[in-house]
Every structure is written in C-alpha cells, then in structure tokens.
Image (cartoon, grey):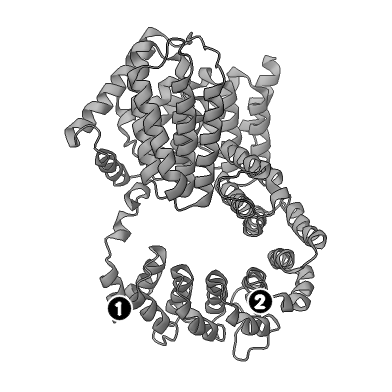
Amino acid sequence: MSDSLAALIHAVETADSSVSLVEAVQKLAHARLEGGIPTLIAALSYNNPGAAVAAVDGLIHLGEPAVPALLEQLDLHNYTARAWAIRALAGIGDPRGLVTLLGAATADFALSVRRAAAKGLGCMKWHWFPDHLLEIAQAEALDALLFVAQQDEEWVVRYSAVVGLQSLMTALQRGHVYGQTAFEQAALSQIQTQFERMAVADAHMAVRARVWLAQQQVQRVQTRSVAVETNSSPLSETDWQLILEKLYARKGQERLVLAEGDPRRYRQLAIAVASEPPNKSALPSSDA
Amino acid sequence: MNTVSGLQDDSSLTVDQAIANLQGEDLGLRVYAAWWLGRFRVDAPEAVDVLMAALTDEADRTMAGGYPLRRNAARALGKLGDRRAVPALIQALECSDFYVREAAAQSLEMLGDEACIPKLMALLQDQVPGTLPAPEPPQLAQPFDAILEALGTLEAKEAIPLVAPFLDHAVPRIQYAAARAMYQLVADRAEASLYAERLVNALANNDLQLRRIVLADLGAIGYLPAAEAIAQTLAENSLKLIALKGLLEKELQQSEPQNLSPGAIQVMTLMDSLL
C-alpha cells in the first residue's frame, strides 16, 4: 500500500504538463489515502483549476483527517489556495471549519467561495455538536444563511443559501424525541418565512424553483419519523473549546460595530474584507 | 449589495454622473460610462437616449479604425431592455467595425424584436457593403456566431436555408452556433434533437474554451437531455451551473408554476451537487 502511495505522490510531484498533473492528482484523490493529504493540499496552490478540483474532491472524501491541515492552509497568504481550502472545508462539514464558513459565506469576494460556504454551513455535522454549543452555532449559521439568501447579488449564491437553509431545517427537525426547543421552533419558523418570501419574490426562476423543492422535501421529512443520530464525534474537548471561543470572538466583534441582529453588521464586515488586499487573511475567523 | 463582490468603487459613480460623462469630453470616461450603464442595468429613458446617440459617435476611434464607444453602447443597450433602441441597433449592424456589429447582433437578440431579422439575414450572407472583417485571424467576414444565435432566438424560420450551411463551417464555435439555431428553428422535434446532440457530443471536445462555449449554447436552448452530460463536463462548476439553470428554467416554463416535473427535480439535484 505504501509503495503505491509513494508512487502516486511521485507522479504528482514529477508531472511535467498541466494535463498529466490533473491526471496524477485525480489518481491520488481516488486512492483515498490519508498519507496523500499533504500532497493534495499542496495541489490547491498549483494554480491549475483541474488539479485543484480533483484535490478538493479527494479531501472531501477523506473528510475529518484532512481538516487540521486545511485549517493551516487558511493562514497562508495565498488567496487561491485559501479559496479551494474553504471549498474543501465546506464539503467536509467538520465543525472546526464553522467559523471560517460563516465569514466566507457572507463576505468572501469570490462567488464560488460564497456559494460553497453557504451550502457547507447547512450541512455541518450538526449531530457532532455537544448540546451546550449546538444552539449558538446553529443560530450563527441561520443568521448568516438568511443574510446570504436575502442580500447576495448572485443568484447562484442565493440558490446555495436555500440548499443550506433546507439542510439546517432538516437538522433542526431531527433527533428530538421530546419535541423541539423554543430556539428550534423559532429558527424553523424564520426559515419557513424566508422560503415563503423567496418563493414568490426572488428575481430568478431557478432560485424560486429551488425554494419550492425545499418546501416540498422538508414537508416530506416532517411527516416521516427520523432516526435519532448519536452525537459521538471524533473531536476532542480542546477542539470544542476552540470552536466556542472563535464563535464568541466573532459575536464580540460584531457587537462592537452594530447591535446584535442588525443585518448591517455583516455588510460592515463585507466592506472591511473587500477592502483588504486579496492575499491577506482578512476574515475574523482566521485571526482566532 | 455590490460591496459583497468588492465592486463598491463602481457603484460610487451616480446615474446622473454617468449620463453626463457619456456626453462629456473625456473619451476614457465616456467609454467607461457606457459600460457602467449596462453593468448596473440603468434603464432610465435618458440613459437609453445617450447610449443610442453614442452608437453614431465619431470621436472615439482606435488606430485600426474601430469604435470602442459604439461597442460598449451597443452592448449596454441589449441589457437595458428598451426596444426604442432597436432601429439604432439595426443601423449599427452596418457599421464598418466587426465588434460593433457583433455587439449589436447580441443586443438585438436580447431585445427580441423581429424587425432586425432581414438585416441579420443580409449580414449572414455578407451582403452589407462597407463592413470590414475581424482584425484578428481567421479574419471572419462577419460575426457569424452572434448572427446565427440571434436568428435562432428570434425564431426566424425563414432563415433555415441560410443557417444550415454553417453547420459545416471551418470554425467550431460557428458550427455550434448553427446547431443551436437549427435546434430552435426546425419544426420537427426529432430532427431538432439531432442538432442538440451534436452539441452534447461537443462537450467532450479537448479544448476547454470550446467546452465552455458549448455549455453556454446548451444552456441557451435549455436542452433537458443534456443535464447529466453537462454535470460531467470538465469545466468550471460556475459555468455548468449557469448551463443547468438554462435547462431548469426552460423546463419550468413548460409546466404550471410550483409544479416541479421529474426533469426539473433531476436538474436541481445535479445543480446541488455542483455548489
């Protein structure tokens, strides 16, 4: 096995054309070997979109083991590699990527990054979260997704926010033998209201249609009894502590600018980020 | 809203200022204002008026004799959706500058007014005097792809005999434009799907730029059977999503609102996987 890993990595490192590089990265990605993670991550900064797409797919399939290295990648001053890393984090749904995705969905200037982050915010592995953290994390994701659904100027990012809201809705509905908490009921009704508004008001028919589909599918989930997922996650106590600190740091920064719940607080953030040089890690998530 | 994508600098130009700039002395500001009015879809009547006037501008010329301001004005007028611009754009189809004619054909397609069909057909046969070829190789005589696409969208069935020969044109993207137009023009749906399948096959082309063009063509005609092949194409997800959106919206037009067909749901499932 390790022989074939070495050979796969060697093929990536010695590829002498754009096409052979894409092929080599695809093969390494398909092998699904944890030992290939550093090479796949390096491929994010080769400035070869085909190789980056293959590497992102491979990292998403590897999942949780790739997360620490992806988070390190965010701190490097390479905007393109950072954008691809965010897309991989969005696909993995690991809670350690949550705060990064909150910033990316609402404020990144590349629509492909906002698009991936919005979907990723909804399909977080919510069942991994411990009870004391779940509500604050979901509240932040909800705020961010509602903002994107209402405000993003690109149809595809709003479409993605609908997909994210639908996933969040499913998470809010499931796993409650004793019924929903007050927060969950309020969040569900906020999403329903947002869907009802978008179903008629969004300027793009494709976005309206995705809202109709979400409304139909969520109804079907409601009428079906959903299996309760266990919340055993591979994350350590320290990981959760760090996620909580980052979330509080994020909320604290927002409060300095504008009151809680004021949608303009994201706008301020967006302006701050957009005015930073592109290779600087300007999102608050990476500072913590 | 534009702050999100980092365009706040552009929004700082006001509508009044852009309209004034377009009539001012500074050629750089004029050409920028024409672009800006289109970019931000400023459809105020005064904006349309000044853009129409810019289509006959003589001040802004390139070394090769091109008309940069006219090009930008022609492009902008398509985006503003005001059919008052149709006669001026038809006139622009006679411009010596290849790129002005290309922009005018694209904008006339967007405005959807059949009045331009005879002039487009004359241009397709290269029968308009005074029109110079494209300055770059292969120095096409006319912007054939833009003309073919416009004739298809405008459902100019009388143009079928003129369009068909372009299926064998030497330039691939012109072949694709012809296939796209034939799909829209022929009445027999079985024959039409043969033209669409040509496009589907072209998604496997080795040239990324051509694959991108074909994605846009399939999105424009909304050919539902192409959905899976579009999702599998080696190209940017952003472009595949735009193409699939074209399929989805075409499919939605065939049924009652909110009544999602299996085809529409299939397209959205593919789109979800590309986000």
Numbered circle sitting on residue A108: none
Within-10-Å neighbours for mark 1: few <14, some 14–19, many 20+: few
| Along the line of sight, the residue nearer the viewer: B130 or B268 | B268
Q: Which residue is mark 1?
A: B26
| Along the line of sight, the residue nearer the viewer: B95 or A222 | A222
Tell me the SS state at disc 2.
loop
Vertical order, B35 against B116 (above or below): above
What residue is rendered at 65% in x and 55% in y? B222
Does the residue at mark 2 contact the one at mark 1 (Cβ under 8 Å)?
A: no
The chain ID associated with circle 2 is B
Numbered circle sitting on residue B140: 2
**Percent x, y for residue B39?**
41, 63
What residue is rendered at 66% in x and 76% in y? B140
Q: Earlier in the sequence, mark 2 or mark 1?
A: 1
State the image quarter where residue B55 is shown.
bottom left
The chain ID associated with circle 1 is B
Considering every residue shown, the one lying at the far left of the view is A256
Within-10-Å neighbours for mark 2: few <14, some 14–19, many 20+: some
For the residues beneath circles 2 and 1, the answer to whether they share a chain is: yes
Q: Is residue B154 left or right of residue B192?
A: left
Task: Tell me the kind of residue under disc 1.
Answer: Asp
Task: Tell me the kind of residue under disc 2.
Answer: Leu
**Percent x, y for residue A8?**
67, 26
Tell me the SS state at disc 1.
loop
State the image quarter where residue A271 is shown.
top left
Q: How many marks?
A: 2
Q: Is residue B24 visible?
A: yes
Vertical order, B202 against A53 (above or below): below
Vertical order, A24 against B183 (above or below): above
**Percent x, y for residue A32?**
64, 22
